[in-house]
Amino acid sequence: MTDSLIIPCAHCASLNRIPTDRLRDAPRCGRCKSDALPNTPFELQQNQFANQIKGDLPLLVDVWASWCGPCRSFAPTFAQAAAQLQGRCRLAKLDSEANPQLSGQLGIRSIPSLILFKGGKEVARQSGAMPLPQLLAWLQQQGI
């Protein structure tokens, strides 16, 4: 029997069982047929948050705002990380202005903020933008 992981779809948040040997093969969501595990960051919405953190793969959330210069300059780095980490970690962006209730629930005090979730729980947090090597090293310290 093939090992599999439960992965929430990046678009509709439906839970999908995906064989581990297919994680890098652009698996499709069984419900909406979109790319369930994109190699780019996806937009996280409040109504999908609970399902998105349930997945078997860790979820790294970048909390940002459109008026934040460091947030905008960090976006390409975060996108590069998503491409490099596909199949090991999912990356999402949370617009703090569009989702103020969730930002408050997460205790966001500064942006950009990175929050790493594993098994439905927050396991690490980092404030501020950082270069790609530093981001990857931080994630490696977290077991990613």
Image (cartoon, rainbow, N blue to C red):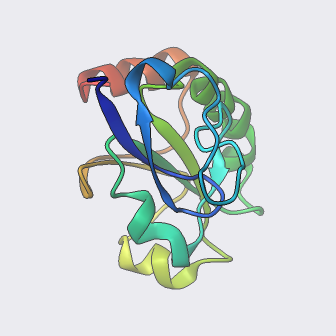
For the point 36% across and 50% down, which residue is it? Answer: 55
Left or right, 51 with reference to 79: left
For the point 27% across and 58% down, which residue is it? Answer: 120
- Residue 108 shows up from this direction: no
Between 62 and 39, the residue placed more toward the observer is 39
Between 63 and 70, the residue placed more toward the observer is 63
Whether residue 110 is situated above or below residue 143 in the rendered picture: below
Residue 32 x, y percent position in the rendering:
69, 59
Report the label total.
0
Left or right, 100 with reference to 58: right
Whether residue 73 is situated above or below residue 97 in the rendered picture: above
For the point 36% across and 27% down, which residue is it? Answer: 139
Residue 73 x, y percent position in the rendering:
73, 38
For the point 24% across and 25% down, which residue is it? Answer: 143
Q: Quadrant of the N terminus?
A: top left
Between 66 and 16, the residue placed more toward the observer is 16
Q: Residue furthest bottom?
A: 101
Residue 106 x, y percent position in the rendering:
37, 70
Residue 78 x, y percent position in the rendering:
62, 34
Q: In which quarter of the image is the C terminus?
A: top left
Task: Say which quarter of the image contains residue 12.
Answer: bottom right
Left or right, 134 with reference to 39: left
